[in-house]
Image: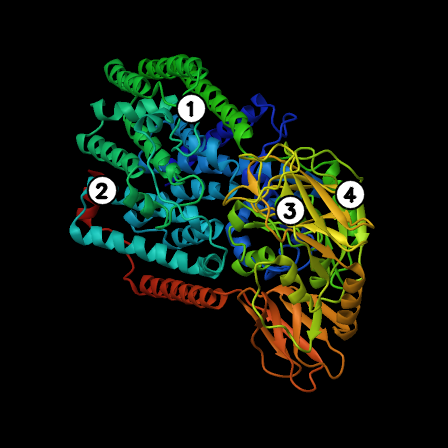
Amino acid sequence: MKATSRPGQAAALLAAAVTAVAFCAGDALARCHPFGPRTRSVNDLGNQFVPFHAHLWDLLHGRTEGGLYVNWRSGYGSSFLPDLGTYLGSPFALLVALFPRDEIDLAVYVITTLKAASAAAAMAWLLLTLRPGRWWAAGLLGSSYALCGWTLADADYNPMWLDGLIALPLLCLVGEWALAGRRRLPGILIVALAWTANFYTAYMATLGAALVLLLRLVLTRPPARQALATAGRAVLTVALGMGLAAPLVTVVYFGTRHAYPGRVTSFRPVPAGDVLARLLPTAYGWGSPALYVGTTALLLALALPFHRAVPGRVRAGWTALVLLAVLSLQWAPTHLVWHAFATPQGSPYRQTFVVCGLLVIAAWQALSYGPPDPRTLGAAAALLALITALAGRSAPVRSFTWPVLLLAVAGALGGLALAARAGRRRRLAGLAVVLLLGTQIGESAATSAVAVRLRLAHMDDYAPWGERQERQSALTEEADAWPRYRTDPGREQTTGNDPLLVGGEGAQYYSSLTSDVLSRTLTALGGGWTSRGRSVQSLDNAVTDVIFSVGARVHSPPDPHQRHAPPAEHPVRVTRRDVPPLVTVRPAPDTRPFGASPYRNQETLLGSRVYTVARVAVRDDSGAPLPSRRVGSGNALTRPTLTARCPAGTQVNLWAPHYSGTARLPGGTTAYFNSRAARNRAAMAPLGTAPASGRLRIRLTPARPGSVPPDAIGCLDTHRLHTAAARLKATGATHVTVSDGTVHAVLPAGSKGIAVLAAPRIAGWRCAAGDGPARPAGEYHGLIAVPLDAGSTSVTCTFHPPGLRLGAAVGAGSLLALVLSAVLGAVRRRRAPAPPTTTSPRERVTAAL
């Protein structure tokens, strides 16, 4: 180890530096934040990762509601530990605390860059551990791995996946230590860290490291007993490491079991030409495996079967493993194995980084035995030409691919040829290194820039922190009085997780772990969602504000950054409402199940009749009725109209979950609805006040075909609502305290029936009335309910994340086993006979020889 320490450090530093430079250069070429005006926050980066890191910043600085157990900002109260384990488990996430709060986008960018650089350094160190070689070559290939197409096209906007990129070479190192029978404790800690940082990609990295270790055993051919001992050490190391990570992993697992079910998909392999195309620089395609590892690494991997300096078993073994790994991408059974037996809803090739790692290790096997000779390079170039010809007409290949590819091939072939001829000539070797590193940086920067620009063209994107968020945050903070009432940062969302980003306590919440009960409850009340139900939206509705104790609401113009946003009609403002406390008492709760009408469902939860549900007619431009109630298609013209009657002075609400476009009541504001079949559901929206005549003519402007339900319009009697709110307030809790996972409410004397906590009844809540025992919380139409005993004057509810106790028990058992193992090892070493302090004459003669 000491012999490789200094070259390993130099290789790791070179790999990290090249990766950071190329990564940033790609964003600079694309004129992307922080190097230009374009945002890089596409898809889940802007919707999830940046807001979750902002919430972590608030937690670390003591500026948020809730703690590690409950996130009171999102979804009216959601379990936070599963989100922490999914999005924020990496040690790199803690670096967010070092940045200003308004530079949260920069913080996430720096963390992303550091993760990629760390993966490069880890791979460079692994390569020199697998086999000695030139440190600069290990650094070059380490950066090839970290700058693979999977990183540049898929993972740089899913930063949590990059922890798997780091984990793969580290876990391969753990395999090497198991092979050598040493460093068990560091190996266990690395496994625990990898599975804590992101267990999803750590699972894939563990499979990849197991394949590498298996091949190493096949190539080294140790005795059967030694091979079994190595496998046993490896399995024990992984088991203990996973055990130490269990407190977080089990919480995430149980969180997924209680999450709203996503779309069920089946795997369909992409054409072989698309797979080959993604080996080339700047080739980009959604839903195909991004196998690019740089032209130099690719040429070396292609040269391996022909490189006679490499032992035949090594050539055959690594070539076969790479080919099998590539084929496993396209076969449904192995696809399921790679993805823990569940096809992901997004990209179906999330395991690609493992295949890229195997490609780079194969390239190292070719280079570490000496640069390939011209004949071998010619064979590799011929294979690359064949790959290019087969992939040339594939969709991922575009016109700009060809000049970048030609320059990269020239640079790689030239650099490898110079390296082969250099020998001890430093100038020639230095020129080869400069040419190869320049090629790596140039083609990777171009590949990254293309991916950034093309993602912006077909994915949703979100503006970085700016004036809009500053204003939202300032108004939310000014109006906030938690836990006396909630402050919603606004229906006109900037991201899918505005409460995490700008503060407040709203319904809005987007996570892979969004609870089933939250999504279904808000849907029944007229709420909208995107991402097939996992991104629930704020609901701007007076009745639900009373139900959930939303006493202040921020109203902003639609985000101008969104291409579908209608023009602004009003300035940013805050509206306030006198609402009941978080805990209310229902003497005679309505136990009937929710029905189809969100207006009636809201009344059920409120406990009072406040709506008149109008009969709606849908007419086209000529005034003719549309019996099908479909708009935007068929014989419906471009501006249909809804007609109905409401009592004068009532507030008009429109519920059209399957309509996309705008709706406007004369004298009211324009409401925007966004529905896409199976993906988005439009939320109920207020349109204004019914005129004295009571006749309504609501003008629709459809954006795409949709439909309007017969009970689409609800006329809200605000006086009745005020009376209902006052009654709930008078009989509700007189004092409520909230601290992380505990809610305590003092009730008026003589309270009976059930106490209802205005929070979704997610798994993990236990409640007690008065001094009674804590029991699993009851449910009242999706909310937390506590039956009241005679004389109960208080309610206490506590939350324990499901799976935490099990995970803690497994973690404690693993820690105990680790300690016992260390103690037994120390005892054995102390009892072992000491080596002789003197040498015999024969030993002295042998040593001299």
In front of the other: label 1 or label 2?
1
Q: Residue 433's spot in the image, x, y percent?
A: 42, 19
Q: Is residue 143 above or below residue 581?
A: above
Q: Mark 2 and mark 1 in contact (Cβ < 8 Å)? A: no
- On screen, residue 91 versus residue 819, left or right, reads right
Q: Residue 292's spot in the image, x, y percent?
A: 39, 28
> Is residue 521 visible to us here?
yes
Task: Find the residue positioned furthest to the bottom.
Answer: 790
Q: CA distance from mark 4 to mark 1?
A: 49 Å
Q: Residue 409's spot in the image, x, y percent?
A: 37, 15
Within 10 Å of disc 2 (Cα), the crowding (few <14, some 14-19, many 20+) is: few
- Location of mark 4 (residue): 668
Q: Which numbered tag is attached to residue 308? A: none
Q: Residue 170's spot in the image, x, y percent?
A: 40, 44
Ranked by sequence position, the earlier of labels 3 and 4 is 3
In front of the other: label 4 or label 1?
4
> Is residue 836 visible to us here?
no
Q: CA distance from mark 4 to mark 2?
A: 98 Å
- Location of mark 1 (residue): 283
- Location of mark 3 (residue): 617
In front of the other: label 3 or label 4?
3
In front of the other: label 1 or label 3?
3
Q: Is residue 258 above or below residue 559?
A: below
Ranked by sequence position, the earlier of labels 3 and 2 is 3
In front of the other: label 4 or label 2?
4
Q: Amino acid at mark 1?
A: Ala
